[in-house]
Image (cartoon, grey):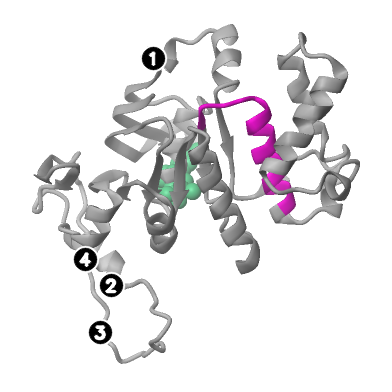
Amino acid sequence: MLRVDDVTKVYRTGLFGSGSQTAVSGVSFDVRPGEVVSLIGESGSGKTTVGRMILRLTTPTAGTISFGGEDVAGYSRRDLRRYYARVQGVFQDPFSSYNPIFKADRVLALVKGFFPEIGRSAWDERVEEALNAVRLEPGACLGKYPHQLSGGQLQRMLIARALLLDIKLLVADEIISMLDASTRIDVLNLLGDLKERGLGVLFITHDLSLGNYISDRAVILRHGMIVEAGATSKVFGNPVHPYTRMLLTSVPQLHTKWDATRPRPVVEQTSGETAAHLVEVEPDHLVAAVGETS
Ligand code: ADP
Ligand code: MG
């Protein structure tokens, strides 16, 4: 369904674009229907840049992103409208997707414009279904302003909006980082429901345990490059790259207390890295050749 193929993004930086920063380098992966793929990496590893390129909010410097076999770079304004009816993003800060001067459910009302053929009462029914699907009580969230709703409610309303559009792919960028613990699990489980409906999800997170909880496949990014990717059970169960192992050992364990004296694993930073060569160590498990990126 979605194919990210050897994609690189170099940002121009500095005054008059005199400098450059490679945020993403030679990244390839797929998201299939009904599949949750987590894109995992530390802050600054290029995750959001990948999501923004998929959503055509920024363009790749090299490589192609295709959806249903079509290169999204070639889309006209009209094609893009069609694309956004299939592919939507939800981001870390739900408040940023709402205009504070309008009622929150305006994000749902605006979707109606995509479906001129549907009558008013049929539409209202659809809205109610979508709210039910994200476990939002219509009475509790319709007619309210964004500041009257919680982050979790706003996040869910954005997912309801995606459902109304009947999208095929959701790009979810750190969508639960800002939620409190009790809402987090609900939103995670909701993503599981979406998957059951055949939706593909790119679940972007810096939190390894969330990636493990939710995804079928995992892609580990470091400095904009893939270090390890494949079936989540394989990447987490049998991590091969030293960086993935380091990440896994640094996940806080519930039964152990923080200990300042405990030695912390370190993976050396190297500069001037070039796109890694991925090697298949077992079926559906790719690892960057060590020595090229470690
Ligand atoms: P993540 O989401 O994993 O934290 P980002 O994709 O936001 O990573 O950023 C990757 C790198 O690209 C970072 O070093 C960041 O500073 C840089 N970057 C992101 N957006 C821009 C931009 N608009 N202009 C210049 N550099 C950027
Ligand atoms: Mg980010």
Is disc 1 placed on a helix, strand or loop? strand
Which residue position is annotated with label 1? 71
Q: Earlier in the sequence, mark 1 or mark 4?
A: 1
Picture quadrant of residue 247: bottom left
Which residue position is annotated with label 4? 267
The residue type indicated by label 3 comes to Pro
Residue 87 spot, x, y in % from top left: 53, 26
Whether ligand 1 has any atom under 8 Å from the Cβ at mark 3 is answered as no
The residue type indicated by label 4 comes to Val
Looking at the image, residue 240 sits to the left or right of residue 9; the answer is left
Tag 3 and tag 2, C-beta contact below 8 Å: no
Whole-angstrom CA distance, mark 3 to mark 1, is 47 Å
Which residue position is annotated with label 2? 249
Q: Earlier in the sequence, mark 3 or mark 1?
A: 1
Q: Quadrant of ligand 1?
A: top left
From this view, report whether residue 5 is shown above or below residue 94.
above
Whole-angstrom CA distance, mark 1 to mark 2, is 39 Å
Residue at x-position 72% and y-position 42% = 132
Whole-angstrom CA distance, mark 3 to mark 4, is 13 Å
Q: Earlier in the sequence, mark 3 or mark 2?
A: 2
Region in magenta: 153-169
Tag 4 and tag 2, C-beta contact below 8 Å: no
Picture quadrant of residue 158: top right
Q: Quadrant of the N terminus?
A: top left
**Residue 222 in view:** no
Q: Earlier in the sequence, mark 4 or mark 2?
A: 2
The residue type indicated by label 1 comes to Asp
